[in-house]
Amino acid sequence: AGLVRKVDAMFSIDAMVHVDLQYLVTYWINAAQVLKKGGRILITLADPTSEAGFQKITRDIAKFYKFQGRMCPKFEYLSIPIVKHVLESLGFTMEKLEHWAQRQGAAPRDIYLIARLDRPEKADRFLSAIQSSSGDNDPIAGLGLSGAETYGEMWDRYATKLLASGSLDDSPNLNAVFKRLFEPGDVKTWSRAIEIGGADGKYAERVLAANSKVKLSRFDVSRKFLDAAEQRLSRFKDRVSSIEIDGTKP
């Protein structure tokens, strides 16, 4: 709109408290493109690390689940240290970054923020990086660019690229994760387990091999991942069941 480096301030008061970090970073990158050097963002955010903020999260999750049949992604990663790090990485300097609870009698739910753009070149470099071509070998390149589709169709498209890339078969890394996470979690004592979103079953295979008694139920929104996992886990088929999550209302 012809406003690049012409704007003194962008403000969103109580308008951005219900969004997650990826939306906020998009907002901040866009702000950094239009603000003058020294221009400011004024914004309020909801902080999940306070008791009152967490109570608000649970109320909103209940509301979203009731009316939309899904969980809501609000308030992810919005603690003060992360907000500060992201904005400083984009070239902003914090002038105010505090809980509103510092006012007597106020609930410690919101973060009040003033950020001044001092190094616009940092934001420009970041924008250039995310706009650059990812290349044909990037399994997630182009996700979300094909028009309307269900959640299941999106993940099927991701599964097709990832399975073709062969990048799922990193045995040394998988073995290290299994040793560090599953073995301390007493995997050999389990009788029943559920896996959510396990792709082609690379960890399920290790669980079933380590424990000859465990029965495993696997849930995924991608039919392609479930099919790939069923093939991989065929020797354990008497102990594994696969359930496809509804891709329209996951």
Image (tube, rainbow, N blue to C red):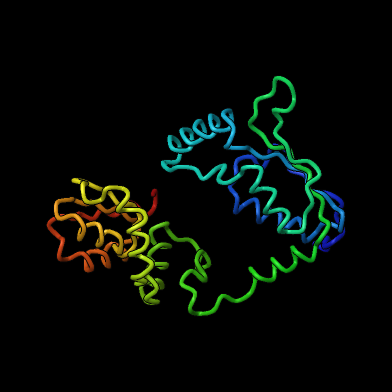
Coordinates of residue 192 in the picture (x, y in percent): 21, 46
Task: Judge left or right: residue 172 versus residue 8.
Answer: left
Residue 171: image quadrant is bottom left
The residue lying toward the viewer, choosing from 80 and 162, is: 80
Coordinates of residue 169 in the picture (x, y in percent): 34, 72
109 w.r.t. 244: above or below: above
Coordinates of residue 50 in the picture (x, y in percent): 59, 32
Identify the residue at image location x=73%, y=28%. 102
Task: Judge left or right: residue 64 versus residue 1.
Answer: left
Residue that sits furthest to the bottom in the current view: 136
Identify the residue at image location x=38%, y=58%. 152
Coordinates of residue 61 in the picture (x, y in percent): 48, 36
Residue that sits furthest to the top in the current view: 105
Residue 12: image quadrant is top right
131 w.r.t. 46: above or below: below
The residue lying toward the viewer, choosing from 126 and 13, is: 126
Task: Judge left or right: residue 8 versus residue 29.
Answer: right
* Quadrant where the image shows the N terminus: bottom right
Q: How many marks?
A: 0
